[in-house]
Image (cartoon, grey):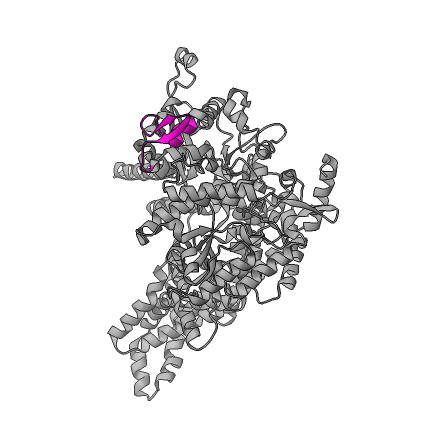
Amino acid sequence: MLRKKMMTLALCITLLASVLTACGGGNNDKGQSGSNGEGTTDSFNSTDNPYKDPMTITLGFWDADAEIANIEKDPIAKQVLEKFKITLKPVNMTWDDYTQKIQMWAASGQLPDIFAIDAVGTQYQRKWVEQGVVKALPELSKYPNLAKYFESPDIKGLGVDGKYYTVPRRMFPSVDWSALDRMVFYRWDLAQKVGITKEPETWEEFEAMLDAIVKADPEGKRITGLTTTTTKMLGGFFWLYGNPVATSDGSGSDFKWIKEDGKFIPAVFSKNALPALQNMKNMYEKGLIDPDIALVKPAESYDNFVAGKAAALLSGGGYINLNGDMYEKRWKTAYPDKDMTESVKALKPLIGPDGERSHAIFKTYWSESYFSNKVDDKKMDRIMALYDYVLSTEGKDLLTYGIEGVDYKIENGQKVVIEKGSLNEKYPASRFLKNLVAYETSDSYNMDNPTIANESIRQDAVDYIDWIQNNTKVPEYDIRLTYMSTPTKDKFTVLDHDDLLKIMLSKEPVESYWNNILNDYKAKGLDKMIEEVNAKAKEQGIE
Amino acid sequence: MADSVTARTPKRSLRTLAPKQSLGKTILQYKYFYLMVLPVLIWYALFSYAPMYGVTLAFKSFNYSKGILGSPWIGLENFQTLLTDPDFRRAFWNTVIISLMKLITHFPMPIILAIVLYEFSRTKMKRFFQTILTFPHFISWVVLSGIIINILSKDGIYNQIIMLFGGDPNSPLVDESAFRPVLYITHVWREIGWDSIIYLAALAGINPELFEAAEVDGANRFRRLLNIAWPGLKSTVAVLLILQVGQLLTQGSSFEQIFNLYSSPVYSVADTIDTYIYRTSFTIGSDFGYTTAVGVVKSIISLILLWAANTFAKKMGEEGLY
């Protein structure tokens, strides 16, 4: 009897212990820790080839599971990772949850070796650097392509006490290219149906076109005017009416500063703000903006635009997303016989009240790679080597154009595409591997580059950016003030898209509502922040 | 009252009959029962009580590299910041208003529904309505909010009806004056059926002979409800009221519901403590210590409300929770 009882007791304890062990397991994969013990180290071979030992690197990237699973189907991506004996292990995050997940991982010491986020200028990013959550990059002279990459002014400006803690994902070679990242596309076919014969160049002409389409509703779909894929983009368009420096990427921390009445202030709070807000409100009240704009979702907005339920669409990602989200996913199925470029036009920056054609202004990069402080020097060296290779001409060409002789050939010093199909389908992980380091979106705006598979769209894209570079100019502002750290500024956010939406939908007059918003910002320390920034700018000799 | 006295009697007799012995001996005597309860205790200790050390964060400035325990103490600084933060004040009052209004608009509804369903003589119809009304409880707010947004959008049925009567289309979801009523109505719609189940169970527990006797004595339907059904329900209502008040600031201002339905034009009337903590922690990225302080304030208020409701129930002659 006693034996039976002892057995029962022992079983219960064993069961409990195994449950607790399982609970405690969590994400602690010893294989990913900084003091990694991956692979067998052969000192002789290691000296011959520094990347001989296999190494597992954990990676937190958007939809990392699916992206890394594609590597198996992609001979080029496999080849690149094999070169550095790297196996990528996904730590999944999505576009909906990445900020939350990364902050939780940072707080609980569970960050993956590499992770991607758009955090420059945020409070938490500053703390990660100050408190040693992220690892500083090693001396870059060993990695020539990376070192060159860091020569770009707004990337160089990210250094903290002579060290870099992040590799930003560069998109464009200059700020002029930001025009691509907040674009308005409109239904030119519907405009023509209602008698519009000239593409709009001024705000008045654009409004007149929307008004004509909405009133005539040529397809009987109760069409609305301008809609957007996400409300975060609103500032990227409406500030262009005379206050373009106020455009921001929606993070709340990238606001730019201008000098007004002898002192630096955030451009959002300039005297030019009110006319821009009034213009937006007028458009809303005239029924030229989607009444459901506050509740939009990306997929639905694309659907509505393609289905002819919205006359214009404000979206991000330029022609690359136009090609992917609009043409590939929707248009070619909905209208197989209709050339999209004949029916959908991109709105060229409109002539504003100041007589200027302004476009959105952002940084030349969007989002950054960070490296956990648990990554040891050996692993960091391997990561840097991979990044350096992806940025090299050889790496870029391989991941963009495919294999020479198979996918492209060189004729008269130019790359000529042999493979006419989509390279994204043939090499499903190459773009991801390239994006891991830098988007280099601007490379796609070239007729030799197959990223935008539809050639008519590619031609439009090339023409558009050429036009932008010849016809627009970037207004003056000093990026150093955006990056500047002061006690109040570090905690200050300007979510201007929320403010724009409130003003648009409010029943109050624009001026009084804007004053309320200003007072809210003042209560949060706006004046103090302006004082601090001006004092520090003076100290640093910024005029 | 008589019932409760009889219910307590066996406990007393057990207590008097049980020989006095030390705790250790009692544990040894009932060791298998204690062993069975051990995993539950461990679970609570590990997952409910141990993490409560995190509350100390409200008095600290969170440092990523030092963790919760190693972060430096800053006294009441987070609470001082909180008192001067206009966004927190707005979120606090929104939480109180939305929670109380939900309590007022929702709490009586399941009771009324339970009584109406109880009075339904046709069993099939009763089951039909009960199923229909209980069903929305099982759909998540993410899905429900999609349905609600479609109904209330420009092309939705709500605006089509408005336009039919010559009105201007507008979405109540972006209208400061209409957003809260949408919250109350959709909350009742989702929960009324589910919440009525417990009252239906209480009604089912009443001896039917009492109703029959009252009917024989000439009591009409209303009298029977007032003198038989209501006294049978009263104690259940009191317990559930206490529970609801205790959860007022959390479930009352349901995070999922508001988070999925709101947008910046209605933050002024819809941003509650929970949505505020979420936005400041993850979108804006404020100090975790500060947001913990916000959470602590909310818990203290919940505790006070729970205590007040329990005291009130006891003063009304009901049992209360403790």
Q: Dividing the picture into quarters, in which one does residue A257 lie?
A: top right
Residue B208 lies, in percent from the top left, at: 29, 77
Whether A420 is among the magenta residues is yes
The residue lying at 41 percent from left, 49 percent from top is: B21
- Pick whichever, A196 or A514, lies toward us: A196
Q: Is residue B38 shown to the viewer in this render?
A: no
- Pick whichever, A248 or A334, lies toward us: A334
Residue B59 lies, in percent from the top left, at: 61, 45
**Residue A245, relative to residue B178: is it above or below?**
above
Q: Dividing the picture into quarters, in which one does residue B265 lie?
A: bottom right
Stretch of the chain drawn in magenta? A395-422
- Pick whichever, A64 or A155, lies toward us: A155
**Residue A279, relative to residue A149: is it above or below?**
below
Residue A100 lies, in percent from the top left, at: 48, 45
> Is A309 left or right of A128, judged from the image as shown?
left
> Is A50 left or right of A131, judged from the image as shown?
left
Whether A441 is among the magenta residues is no
The residue lying at 53 percent from left, 63 percent from top is: A284
Q: Dividing the picture into quarters, in which one does residue A204 lie?
A: bottom right
Residue A396 lies, in percent from the top left, at: 43, 29
The residue lying at 35 percent from left, 50 percent from top is: A339
